[in-house]
Amino acid sequence: DGGITQSPKYLFRKEGQNVTLSCEQNLNHDAMYWYRQDPGQGLRLIYYSQIVNDFQKGDIAEGYSVSREKKESFPLTVTSAQKNPTAFYLCASSILYFDGYTFGSGTRLTVV
Amino acid sequence: GENVEQHPSTLSVQEGDSAVIKCTYSDSASNYFPWYKQELGKRPQLIIDIRSNVGEKKDQRIAVTLNKTAKHFSLHITETQPEDSAVYFCAASPNRDDKIIFGKGTRLHILP
């Protein structure tokens, strides 16, 4: 069953800790993206990657880091430098020159 | 970079009436315009998209129109039903690097 999987669904973090969100896809998509969703803010791009071992910053990359060691995987690390990390995080993937995104089901991160 | 404005932020229509959501974009190079529907607690799903070589596209009760000169595009839902209640996002992509820039979303309520 092809798709894009995010884990965990809910994540709680103490202030000052780094945390990594998982995103895996078996759609053979080249490109992968991380978005952050806040109420009334729409979807804002954090990082994206079009090819293994390469990625670019989006509009709100500060305080986040990513890696793309495998085509199927694009983990996002929320570092302690991110001032307001509580949000809903969505991962997406697409074919290059594409037919739109396929989204994961999201991870809700809460800093406690 | 691209900026997408979406209006209204909230829209209530009587069941059976039509709903229209409007978006504008800033980058004249944008040539791909998808629309996503996000039901409460679920991932965004692509419902319709349009490319810049087409002025209008229709899929059953949903239609999208594009005015490249004015940099406007709109989503039209006819004969609205309760299951149309959701948040709708418009988006634009210049396709130079495949990233999509989203509007802030419209919360559509279908009233019984």
Image (spheres, grey):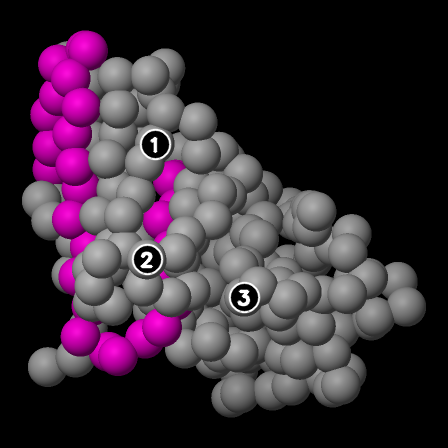
Q: Pointer 3 indicates a residue of which chain? A: B
Real-space Cα separation, disc 3 to disc 1, in angstroms = 21 Å
Looking at the image, do the residues carrying marks 3 and 1 touch, with CB atoms under 8 Å apart? no
Residue drawn at the location 43% of the way across and 41% of the way down: A46
Residue A53 — which label? 2
Residue drawn at the location 26% of the way across and 79% of the way down: A28
According to the image, label 1 marks what residue? A64
Assess disc 1: are there few (<14), some (14-19) or many (≥20) residues with their C-alpha within 10 Å of its C-alpha. Answer: many
**Residue B89: x, y in percent?**
52, 56
What secondary structure is marked by label 1?
Answer: strand
Real-space Cα separation, disc 2 to disc 3, in angstroms = 17 Å
**Residue A24: x, y in percent?**
17, 61
What secondary structure is marked by label 2?
Answer: loop
Count of number-bearing discs:
3
Magenta-drawn stretch, dominant element (helix, strand or loop): strand
Extreme-front residue of the structure: A53
Residue B98 — which label? 3
- Region in magenta: A10-37
Q: Pointer 1 indicates a residue of which chain? A: A
Magenta stretch: residue A31 in it?
A: yes
**Position of residue A105 in the picture relative to residue A55 (left or right):** left
